[in-house]
Image (spheres, rainbow, N blue to C red):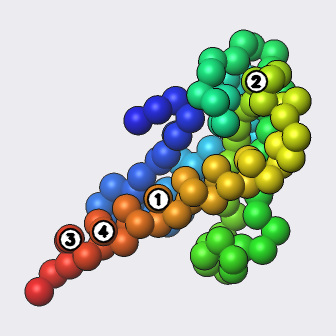
Amino acid sequence: MSKRHRRIRALPGDCPGALKRQLPTLAALVRQARQDPPPCLLCEESVGVGTTVHTFTPDDTATWGIPRGLLVSSVYTLCPSCEALEHVHTRVLAVLWQEWQERQAQLTEARTAFRWN
């Protein structure tokens, strides 16, 4: 798993309250990304400490396929050369959308593979 993707998974028998206590807050993720920055979202180059950490939370959760009431955010960094690119916001959204779609496809595969008959 790359440094850019940090996930916490529920264990069998975990109650939602226990899982909620495990999940880091957005502020904690930003603080961690400032101390140990992930690579640039667009070019995968390593960025140094002190680089601006960006967050993305979709406004229209229905378009992203996120259940109502669920808050999903992404924390990422950009290297100085990528920050200077034209239409950088559109490029970042395209990468985040592609990663989200890949994760959804993996979840769908996992659900169908472990279905009880």
Whole-number angstrom distance, CA of label 2 to CA of label 1: 24 Å
Whole-number angstrom distance, CA of label 3 to CA of label 1: 15 Å
Mark 1 falls on what kind of element? helix
Residue found at x 60% / y 76% = 65
Q: Residues within 10 Å of mark 3 (few under 14, many from 20)?
A: few
Residue at mark 4: 109
Q: Which residue appears farthest toward the left when viewing the image?
A: 117
Q: Nearer the viewer, mark 3 or mark 2?
A: 2
Residue at mark 1: 103
Question: What is the quadrant of residue 117 in the picture?
Answer: bottom left
- Give the mark nearer the N terminus: 4 vs 1: 1
Q: Which residue appears farthest toward the top when viewing the image?
A: 48
Mark 3 falls on what kind of element? helix
Q: Residues within 10 Å of mark 1 (few under 14, many from 20)?
A: few
- Give the mark nearer the N terminus: 3 vs 1: 1
Q: Is residue 72 above or below residue 62?
A: above
- Give the mark nearer the N terminus: 2 vs 1: 2
Mark 4 falls on what kind of element? helix
Residue 32 visible from this viewpoint: no
**Quick check: marks 3 and 1 in contact, CB under 8 Å?**
no
Residue 112 visible from this viewpoint: yes
Residue type, mark 2 in image: Cys
Whole-number angstrom distance, CA of label 3 to CA of label 2: 39 Å
Residue at mark 3: 113
Residue at mark 2: 79
Residue found at x 68% / y 55% = 94
* Residue 9 badge: none
Whole-number angstrom distance, CA of label 2 to CA of label 4: 34 Å
**Quick check: marks 3 and 4 in contact, CB under 8 Å?**
yes
Mark 2 falls on what kind of element? loop
Residue found at x 82% / y 68% = 59
Image location of residue 10, percent across then percent down: 40, 56
